[in-house]
Structure formats: structure tokens, C-alpha cells
Image (cartoon, coloured by chain):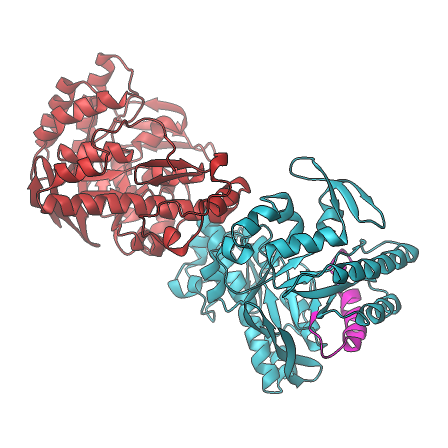
Chain colours: A red, B cyan
């Protein structure tokens, strides 16, 4: 288990993260499998896109079906039939945003389950215990993730507590499981660097940037990343949590981020949106009603190769058919995996900047969809 | 294009239906692809179960996305990327049961679309025109399908009109498309045989039994089938529409039915129910919470072979995850396809009665699910 950088191109880097469930080439995008399934997709389909690590959610699996149950059935890899690497988020973000009647103290999060209202206590130790039962390859430390617009004193408090919780997580770490710590600080570069320094002194296997893409302007995130990421320990993997659009990924890889996760490819699929070279297609748009072309003529994913037309995919979306959701999810996850594969190749050839320029994503706005035909 | 019986075992028969899109071995079960997709499944998955013919719905596709649009995109086979045979129901059943403000006259069904309320007129000629645009291999004639409990005079009227409409459909038939006529008459054997005689005199390529499984007791259907099916022209394929449970299929094959369709395998999957050897599993049942076994240890479908456990499938169902719906649909369609493959093999070996006995379905009740472990 460990991480090594293989090549660099500017600040971008390609490497290999070795886990108990195989190697993961970086930069890597982790499809999100919140409750033990990448939404609408079969694990073999996810694998076939090239993805070798996904992220599941401690909070969700803890509440349902329960971590003990998953452990009894052999752990999450066995449960969901995914033999490759799995990371698990610590549950902090969800306890903060999803749960009801949340009380945060130094001990942890006390809250009511959003599923059955039962009273729960998520401490750093409990988060690690649950992640141990799930058997993920990478555990995340429990953190406080404040919204983008909180005042500075609240950010400072969040940071300090997150550091203390990271220490408690490390004290409770599970054998054979890597632990990544989460750095907070919003878009305040000084606070970010301060927290980064504190977290970097802990024996964490990787450093994650939390609290981005939580409502701030894309340019504010880009600005912070440009300044913060180059200060991150180059020997440890750098993980930008919950980000983002294809443009976000290219921007972040350019400054040296190694790992990503985001619900966008699957969530946007559910809303009838496909990522394609040059932009996005919003299939409810009437212009696709009779469009016989595949989503992306340059795409070699199973959906485009099979010849499913935009018109058919639009029909499935409008009719609310699951196959539409499936096919768009598959295409989108393939798009993200291909983007990462392209980046890795470009970096190993020392051509990242050129590649990023060719993708037209290096300077693209992160913002809302723009249809292209 | 045509049909030939290859072997018989008792009254059961196996044969080959040749269509413009390949041969279909009978007895055959057609998965239902109402709006141009077998719900939750990819056409390659349907194909891999062994199915070589599915049935789509004229009424639904006519209203959305529109038959002209499907034709413009190359017809239904091309549109949904299914290169094998397709039958299309005439739309009569849906115009009767789904549409609003329906007026039935000798001309046809006048009704309001259940999608946008638009006023529509479905005549025998329009049904054939739409089925021609869809380009199905088998068109069904427009029929009147009364509920199980209508009085005899209404049944008689339905029968007579259905015959006249079949004649109009034949007059409007499309080149290269087989036409099957629908025989009505409820569970009234005399009326059924009378209508069968009338329809048999028409140059129809196959004869379908409509109006079963519309609310009558299973034993009433079995009783009628035993008496009616043996009177059907042995040279033409016999299609029992909208039926049914595995037990229904075995009973109907035993008296000589060749073709079936039913939403049960996909609809029950949506409700968390799996068909297995010996019965059904209702996954919401708490007993499956920690069950590590596949749905059916004797099943070689991709779901059972992959090792997805009952516990995992139950979790997906409870969490409302699409993958659960997908996997149960795939397993169930595979179950039906395997049942038919087993029947065909048994018939060709002259062992149908023995095979039916071994399946424990020959005398099983058709009724509600019984859990088995």
C-alpha cells in the first residue's frame, strides 16, 4: 500500500496508488457508489470504463443496511461485487447536510437519521469503526464541512476541530486501511494553508481537500486551488473531494490534484444530460427529437458504439424509462474515465498543457450546461 | 416467413416461426417492451437470455414518440437496437383500458390520449398503418377486449366486431408483415370456439387468444384453454396474449400454445420479486436481510452467476436503487427464457409431461406469490 508519482508535466502528475484491492492509476476519477452501487450501473460496466476505485458513503451504509450486516456478508467489496479499490467518505458531510436535528460538539455529530428518525452519534471513532466494518481501502477522517459563506471564526473553529478529529481517527485506525485526512478552510487561502500544515504533520496516507464546490464561484475555487495544491506534500496523494465538472478536473489536475469524485456524471444522467467532447447535451431539448446520431460521434463507449441515437435516448428520457438513465450514466462515467485516461497519457508524455488546450476545457467555464450539436 | 411444427409431445409442440428478423423457436416467451425498451434492460441482455422476439405496443409508441418519428429513424428494430423479431400489439387493449373518454363505434376507438389529452381515433386501418411505420414482424389485428365479467350479449358483440375489424386489418396489411388475429370470448368455450371458427377462415398468419388473464379465476382460464386450444389450426402459431405466471405457461404449453407475452417478470422485479425454481422470493421479506445466497442456486443467469446475494438485492430494493430493478428484471427474464428452453427441449425429446412434472408447475396454483428459501 502506498503512492508513487511516476511522471510530471508542469504541476500535473501521474502516479500509482497501490491498495489492498489493486493499483489505481492517477489522476483518477472515482465514480460515486453512495449506498453500495454506482447509481443505475452494474459493477462490470463501471470496471469496463477503466475506473478502478469508487467511493461509497459511511453515513448512508451505516444507517442502511448497517455496517455490521455488510461485514457479516464479507465487507463492501464482496457485498457489491466490486473487486477493485473502494474509498469511504467519513459521513461528516452527510451528517451535516442530510440528517435532521443535528448537534455538533467536540464529541461528534449527534443527529436523527433521515431514514427512520433514530438518534445517532457519529464520532471520529465510530466513523473509523464503521469504515473498518465496511472494509474500504481508504478511510476518510471525520471533518466539519461548513458552507461557503460562513464567517471566518466559524471556519477557524471547523479547521481546529477537524484536526483534532483526524488525530482521534488515526488513533482508531483499522489495520490494512489507508487513512486520508480532510483539509478545510473554504476559499480562504491563508486558512487552507494553515490547516494543510497542521494536517500534513499527521501520519496520514493522503490529503484530501474538502469544502470545495459547496456554493462558491468556480473562479474562487480555481484561485484557491492554484495557491493551495502546490503546497501539498508531493509524496502523498492529493484528493479533491466532490469536484466536479470536466473543466474543474482539468483545472485541478493542472495544479497537481491526483484523485477526484463527483456525482455529476450519474446525477446529470438522471436529468437527461450527457457529457460530450465540446460540451453537454440536454436531451429534453426538442432539437434532439429526430437526431439519429450517437451522443458523441468520437466516443467509443458502449452506448455510442451500439448506435443508440440521441432521438432514442431522448425518447427514453421523456418516457421516464430506466434504460435511458442507465445508458446516459454509462456514457457519462465513460466520458469521465476517458478524460482521466487522456490526462494520464498526456502527463506521462510531458504534454499536459497541450492536451488540456486541445480538450478546450483548460479555460472553459465550470458553470451551467451549454448545448452543442 | 412462416411457421412449422417440428415435434410434438402430447398436445405440446415445438416449432419454428420464421420472421424477416430471424427465426424464433417455439414455445417462445416474448419479453414486453411497451415503449421500445424491455423495462430496465439493455437489448443485449434480453438477447443473452435466449429471447429472440419481443412485443412492443402500438398505442404507446403511436402517442409517444410517434410512429412517423420511429419510421424516420429506420423503424423500431433500428430505433431500439434490437435486430431480432418484434411483434406489436394492435393498441386496442390500451385504448380500452388506459385512454380517457373512450367512445367505441364500428369505426374504431375514439379517445383522449393518456399523455397529453389529445383526441385520437384508432381504427383498424390506422392500427395497421402505425404497425407498418413501426415495421414490426408481426402485427396484431385491432380487437375489442371486454373485462372478464361482462354479460354474454356484450361478449357476442365484441366478437363480431373483432372479426369485422380483423377483415379490415387484413385489407390494410403491410407488405412483409405477418398478421395475427385475436380471438375473444372470455371463458365461454362455446363463444370462444365460435369466434375461433370465424377468425380461422381469414387468411391470418397466426391466431392469438386475447381476453385471458383479465380478472377471471386461473382455473376458469385453464378450463377454457384445455377445450379451445386443441381446436386451433395446428398449422398456424397459437399465441396466448398477456399470460402469465410460470404455472400458466406450463399449463398452456401442455395444451398446445406456442407463443406468450407477459409483464410479470419485469413488473414483479420492480416490486422486488424474483422467480426461482420452486416458487418466488419477495425480497422485502426480512428473512432475506442477511441471506448470502444467490436468488437461485441452480440458476446460471448473469445475476446468480456473478454472486449477487439476496441480502444485497434486498438492500438495493429497499434503498430504491435502479441496479436492484435491473438485476431482478434480468434474472426474471432469464427465468422465463430458461423455462421455455426447457420446455422446447422436453417436447423435442417427447418428454413434456415428465418435464412439466419435474418443474412442479404442471399442477401449481397460478395465484399469489409463495415465498420459498
Residue B198 seen in render: yes
Q: Nearer the viewer, residue A82 or B113?
A: B113
Is residue A175 in view from this perspective?
A: no
Q: Residue furthest right?
A: B153
Query: Which residue shows up at 65% across the image and 66% down it?
Result: B260
Seen at 66% across and 58% down, the residue is: B368
Does the magenta portion include B230? Answer: yes
Residue at 66% x, 52% y: name it.
Answer: B130
Which residue is drawn at the image coordinates 75% and 63% (left, top)?
A: B170
Q: In which quarter of the image is the N terminus of chain B?
A: bottom right
- Please say if B134 is above or below A121: below
Q: Is residue A14 above or below residue A98?
A: below
Q: Position of residue B306 (x, y in %)?
A: 38, 63
User: Residue B325: where, in percent of width, then height?
Assistant: 50, 51
Range of magenta residues? B211-238
Q: Is residue B25 magenta?
A: no
Q: Nearer the viewer, residue A160 or A229?
A: A229
Q: In which quarter of the image is residue B174?
A: bottom right
Left or right of residue B143: residue A69: left
Q: Nearer the viewer, residue A146 or A313?
A: A313
Amino acid at each position: 500500500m502506498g503512492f508513487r508519482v511516476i511522471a510530471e508535466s508542469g504541476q500535473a502528475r501521474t502516479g500509482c496508488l497501490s491498495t489492498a484491492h489493486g493499483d489505481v492509476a492517477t489522476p483518477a476519477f472515482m465514480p460515486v457508489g453512495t449506498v453500495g452501487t454506482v447509481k443505475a450501473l452494474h459493477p462490470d460496466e463501471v470496471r469496463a470504463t477503466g475506473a478502478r476505485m469508487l467511493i461509497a458513503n459511511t453515513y448512508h451504509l451505516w444507517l442502511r443496511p448497517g455496517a455490521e450486516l455488510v461485514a457479516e456478508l464479507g465487507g463492501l467489496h464482496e457485498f457489491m461485487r466490486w473487486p477493485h479499490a473502494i474509498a469511504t467518505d467519513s459521513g461528516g458531510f452527510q451528517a451535516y447536510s442530510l440528517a435532521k436535528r443535528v448537534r455538533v460538539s467536540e464529541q461528534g455529530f449527534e443527529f436523527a437519521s433521515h431514514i427512520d428518525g433514530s438518534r445517532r452519534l457519529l464520532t471520529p471513532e465510530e466513523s473509523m469503526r464503521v469504515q473498518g466494518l465496511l472494509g474500504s481501502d481508504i478511510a476518510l477522517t471525520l471533518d466539519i464541512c461548513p458552507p461557503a459563506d460562513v464567517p471566518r471564526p466559524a471556519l477557524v473553529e471547523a479547521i481546529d476541530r477537524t484536526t483534532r478529529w483526524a488525530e482521534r481517527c488515526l488513533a482508531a485506525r483499522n489495520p490494512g486501511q489507508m487513512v486520508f485526512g480532510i483539509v478545510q478552510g473554504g476559499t480562504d487561502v491563508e486558512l487552507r494553508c494553515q490547516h494543510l500544515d497542521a494536517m500534513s504533520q499527521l501520519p496520514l496516507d493522503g490529503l484530501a481537500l474538502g469544502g470545495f464546490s459547496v456554493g462558491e464561484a468556480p473562479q474562487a475555487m480555481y484561485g484557491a486551488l492554484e495557491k493551495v495544491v502546490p503546497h501539498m506534500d508531493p509524496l502523498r496523494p492529493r484528493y479533491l473531494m466532490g469536484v466536479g465538472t470536466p473543466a474543474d478536473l482539468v483545472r485541478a489536475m493542472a495544479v497537481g490534484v491526483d484523485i477526484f469524485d463527483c456525482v455529476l456524471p450519474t446525477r446529470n444522467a438522471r436529468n437527461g444530460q450527457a457529457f460530450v467532447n465540446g460540451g453537454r447535451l440536454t436531451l429534453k431539448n426538442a432539437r434532439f427529437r429526430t437526431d439519429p446520431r450517437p451522443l458523441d460521434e468520437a466516443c467509443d463507449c458502449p452506448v455510442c458504439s451500439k448506435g443508440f441515437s440521441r432521438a432514442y435516448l431522448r425518447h427514453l428520457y421523456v418516457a421516464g424509462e430506466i434504460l435511458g438513465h442507465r445508458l446516459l450514466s454509462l456514457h457519462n462515467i465513460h466520458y469521465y474515465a476517458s478524460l482521466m485516461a487522456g490526462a494520464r497519457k498526456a502527463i506521462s508524455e510531458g504534454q499536459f498543457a497541450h492536451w488540456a488546450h486541445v480538450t478546450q476545457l483548460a479555460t472553459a467555464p465550470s458553470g451551467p450546461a451549454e448545448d452543442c450539436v
